[in-house]
Image (cartoon, rainbow, N blue to C red):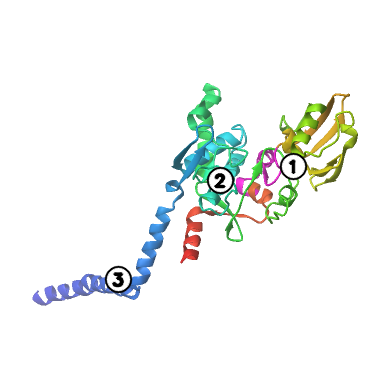
Amino acid sequence: MKKLLGYFILMTMIIVILPLIIVRGCSTVITDIVPEDDKREEQKQEQKKEQTRAGKTKLKVYIKGKGTVEEMPLEEYIKGVVAAEMPVDFEPEALKAQAVAARTYAYGRMKKIYTPSDDIHAGAHICTDSGHCQAWIKKEDALNKWESSKASDNWKKIEKAVLDTEGQILLYENSVVNPVFHSNSGGMTENSEDVWEGTVVPYLKSVVSEGEEASAGYEVETEFKKEDIVQKLKAQYPDFKVGKETLFDEIKILERTEAGRVKSMEIGDVTLKGTEFRSLLGLRSTNFTIEDVDDSKLKITTIGYGHGVGMSQWGANHRAKQGDNHEEILKYYYPGVYIDSIEDVELILNSKEK
């Protein structure tokens, strides 16, 4: 009986206790072969990732009209941009594309990759002037501008578009892009160099943009008094000699861009860019034609709305209706780009700083 009991104890030690000792020993060996420096580096990388998670990233925003600077979480800011920049009844994938473009635009300015030559931000990263940066609206004002019965659902729709793309930004060859966008290109977007002379950007190239005629502002006719046009030209160009009587006959379109927009024109002895003429009269786009109405007025018909470079918002909505997801939309309007996360980009930038 004693022999049997001893045999049982011995077998228990071999089957149960010995494996535990071996496993514990193996665990110790595995830990020992990982250098302490490597473990510390891994911990540092994780800490950096945690610090740069999109939900914790903040930026300073100059609020136009109030003249104040507010610090806010990046993702909350993006909700306000999407609400201000794109109609809420657009397709969810179009709203997501807008969120990624807006986030990339803001991030590029937070990191000072793209900075304006004129500092009107009062030390902030970005402003709420749509003519200078991006439009933005606070939640309360957005809710008030919508029908009360739809306001809550509208905001949830925007929140979902931002949440579903949280932290996503656009890169081109490992660099953060400058994803400019506009409302409506008039059927074809512009090359960057045709709008901003000398600014050749590989991902800001002209592409066909279908479905934009669904916009109520696709084609707009506006009448101008000849006398007003002459006065504005004289104020801008002191040597301008043309009078209102011969104004129409003195206007000549010299060149149009690939997208059909006016690149350069001549009025009397003055040669000016289409972008300058658009700015002078406050036209919706540089895709315009001019007609003589009578002795006192001209009619200018514009196609599209905005500078025409980058993503067309109405075009994005059309592509979403056709089944494109937000990534496909963005890659179409910004050829050659890809989506990455802020966390990954931060690690790249931190490694470059070392």
Is disc 2 placed on a helix, strand or loop? loop
Residue 338 x/y as whole percent = 60, 55
Q: CA distance from mark 3 to mark 1?
A: 69 Å
Q: Which one is in front, 269 or 311?
A: 269
Q: Per the image, is 320 magenta?
A: yes
Disc sitting over residue 27 in the figure? 3
Between 100 and 92, the residue placed more toward the observer is 100
Magenta part of the chain: 306-328
Residue 185 lies, in percent from the top left, at 73, 40
Q: Is residue 285 visible?
A: no
- Callout 1 secondary element: helix
Give the mark nearer the N terminus: 3 vs 1. 3
Q: Quadrant of residue 172?
A: bottom right
Q: Nearer the viewer, residue 346 or 192?
A: 192
Q: Tell me if mark 2 has few (under 14), some (14-19) or many (20+) residues whose alpha carbon lies within 10 angstroms of its own.
A: few
The amino acid sitting under disc 2 is Asp
Total marks shown come to: 3
> Residue, x 15% and y 73% (percent of image)?
9
Q: Looking at the rendered structure, which numbered label has been put on residue 275?
A: 1
Q: Is residue 92 left or right of residue 122?
A: right
- Dot 2 corresponds to which residue? 119
Given contact means CB atoms under 8 Å apart, are the residues at marks 3 and 1 in contact?
no
